[in-house]
Image (spheres, rainbow, N blue to C red):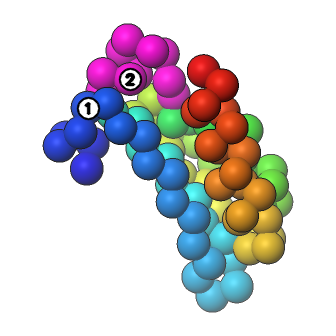
Amino acid sequence: VRNAYDNAIMVVGSEIDGKASLLVMVGERLVNEKRFSAAAIIREIAPLIEGGGGGQPFLATAGGKKPSGLKEALEKAGSIIRGK
């Protein structure tokens, strides 16, 4: 997806075996021109699933033990993206 859309941001959340997972992808153009960072977004939303994570400006992941926090984490990611 990142290679096909250089101006896209994708945030995905899932529950697998009772644990929460998050993935943030940021297109190259947004990283370079708008200074978005997938790693920065993950650091802000991971605590909502009682987890942690990291990665690169283009792609970051997090895992946590609170799947019930996924909706709030995705909403917060949207607010971060809209606010930049």
> Relative to 8, is 74 on the left or the right?
right
Distance between the Cα atoms at labels 1 and 2? 7 Å
The amino acid type found where label 2 is placed reads Leu
Residue 31 against residue 9 in the figure, above or below: above
Residue 13 against residue 55 in the figure, above or below: below
| Residue sitting at the far top | 33
Magenta range is 28-37
**Mark 2 element type:** helix
Mark 1 in CB contact with mark 2 (< 8 angstroms): yes
Count of numbered circles in the view:
2
The amino acid type found where label 1 is placed reads Asp
Q: Residue 27 carries which label?
A: none
| Residue sitting at the far front | 82
Q: Tell me the quadrant of the picture where the C terminus can be found.
A: top right
**Residue 47 % position (x, y):** 80, 50
> Relative to 9, is 77 on the left or the right?
right
* Front in this rendered view, residue 54 or 26: 26
Residue at image location 68% in from the left, 77% down from the top: 19
> Relative to 74, is 30 on the left or the right?
left
**Residue 55 % position (x, y):** 50, 40
Residue 21 against residue 57 in the figure, above or below: below
- Among numbered discs 1 and 2, the one appearing first in the sequence: 1
| Residue sitting at the far bottom | 17
> Relative to 65, is 5 on the left or the right?
left
Residue designated by label 1: 6
Residue 52 in sight: no
Residue 66 against residue 28 in the figure, above or below: below
* Front in this rendered view, residue 75 or 2: 75
Residue at image location 26% in from the left, 32% down from the top: 6
Residue 81 in sight: yes
Residue designated by label 2: 30
Q: How crowded is mark 2: few (under 14 residues within 10 Å), some or many (20 or more)?
A: some
